């Protein structure tokens, strides 16, 4: 049976790649973006199987309206993919209030509005799958990306609670955590704070050394995730597991080393 997907950020990057893959295998897709012009080729090629909608995920009412339109068109939503977002570069001291709020409005609150809009649909169906695209940056952090990490860690924490809240309705939640890939993530809207000279040396010496993956290689993983009867709560994409594993081992070691202090803080 074909599935109905609801994508945010479908005009480019992973969203466009995964939406195209779903359509090519015979699924139906609601593809949303702030600008629907890049979606014209999907509509031209796949016709009635795709519904292209203009959507700014920071507009909560607009998100709910888009979900309603999706259900009117296809009758249901099986998989909702929270993919819309952008990156912001700036040391924590450099990021302005406006920049931080805008980062959270899109990457965090946008994901919350979509989640809240699709949940009534999925509950009525007694099933569905919510895929939250966070990042390896949702479980680790680099200097200069504090605002971005804050937005992604927030989605991770929200979704960890959500998973427990909705499992009895037969709804699955998966946090997809891609490493660096050769998408247009940087070129299509990476925003940068005004630099403070005090951090120039840190920028020069602590810049991350990314290994860049092929975006097309993620398609089989996403389709397998969509078809899984018992999908994982988290799925890392790319060659970043060793680094993430080392971070968690270091955290456990620190917690264990300080466990006597922690236990003493309990009191009685």
Image: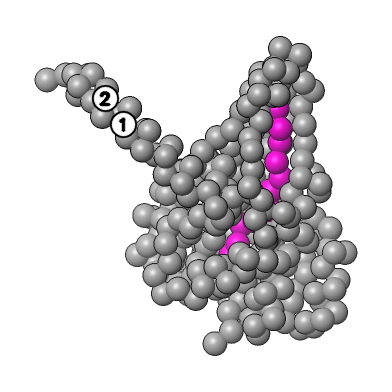
Determine contact: label 1, label 2, CB under 8 Å.
Answer: yes
Q: Position of residue 211 (x, y in %)?
A: 63, 47
Give the residue at mark 1. Answer: 253
> What mark, if any, has residue 257 been given in the picture?
2
Q: Give above or below for 72 relative to 184.
A: below
Q: Quadrant of residue 31?
A: bottom right
Check disc 1: other Cα within 10 Å, few if <14, some if 14-19, many if 20+. few
Q: Quadrant of residue 65?
A: bottom right
Q: Quadrant of residue 167?
A: bottom left
Segment tinted magenta in the rendering: 79-90
User: Which residue is nearer to you in this view: 172 or 68?
Assistant: 172
Q: Please tell me which residue is depicted at 31% across the width and 31% down the height of the picture.
A: 253
Does residue 84 show up magenta in the picture?
yes
In the rendered view of the protein, which quadrant contains the C terminus?
A: top left
Q: Residue furthest bottom?
A: 1
Q: Give above or below for 52 relative to 131.
A: below
Q: Please tell me which residue is depicted at 20% across the width and 21% down the height of the picture.
A: 260
């Amino acid at each position: 049976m074909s599935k109905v997907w609801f994508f945010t950020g479908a005009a480019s990057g992973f969203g466009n790649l995964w939406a195209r893959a779903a359509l090519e295998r015979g699924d139906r897709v609601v593809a949303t973006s702030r600008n629907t012009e890049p979606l014209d080729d999907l509509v031209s090629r796949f016709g009635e199987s795709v519904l292209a909608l203009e959507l700014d995920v920071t507009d909560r009412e607009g998100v709910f309206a888009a979900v309603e339109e999706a259900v009117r068109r296809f009758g249901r939503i099986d998989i909702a993919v929270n993919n819309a977002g952008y990156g912001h570069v700036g040391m924590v001291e450099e990021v302005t209030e406006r920049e931080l709020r805008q980062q959270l409005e899109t990457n965090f609150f946008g994901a919350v509005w979509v989640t809240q809009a699709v949940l009534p649909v999925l509950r009525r169906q007694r099933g569905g799958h919510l895929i939250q695209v966070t990042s390896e940056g949702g479980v680790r952090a680099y200097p200069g990306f504090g605002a971005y990490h804050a937005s992604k860690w927030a989605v991770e924490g929200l979704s960890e609670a959500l998973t427990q809240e909705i499992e009895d309705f037969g709804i699955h939640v998966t946090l997809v955590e891609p490493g660096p890939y050769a998408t247009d993530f940087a070129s299509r809207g990476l925003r940068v704070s005004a630099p403070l000279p005090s951090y120039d040396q840190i920028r020069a010496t602590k810049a991350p050394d990314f290994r860049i993956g092929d975006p097309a290689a993620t398609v089989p993983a996403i389709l397998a995730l969509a078809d899984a009867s018992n999908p994982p709560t988290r799925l890392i994409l790319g060659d970043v597991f060793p680094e993430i594993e080392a971070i968690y081992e270091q955290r456990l070691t620190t917690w264990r080393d300080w466990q006597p202090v922690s236990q003493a803080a309990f009191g009685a």
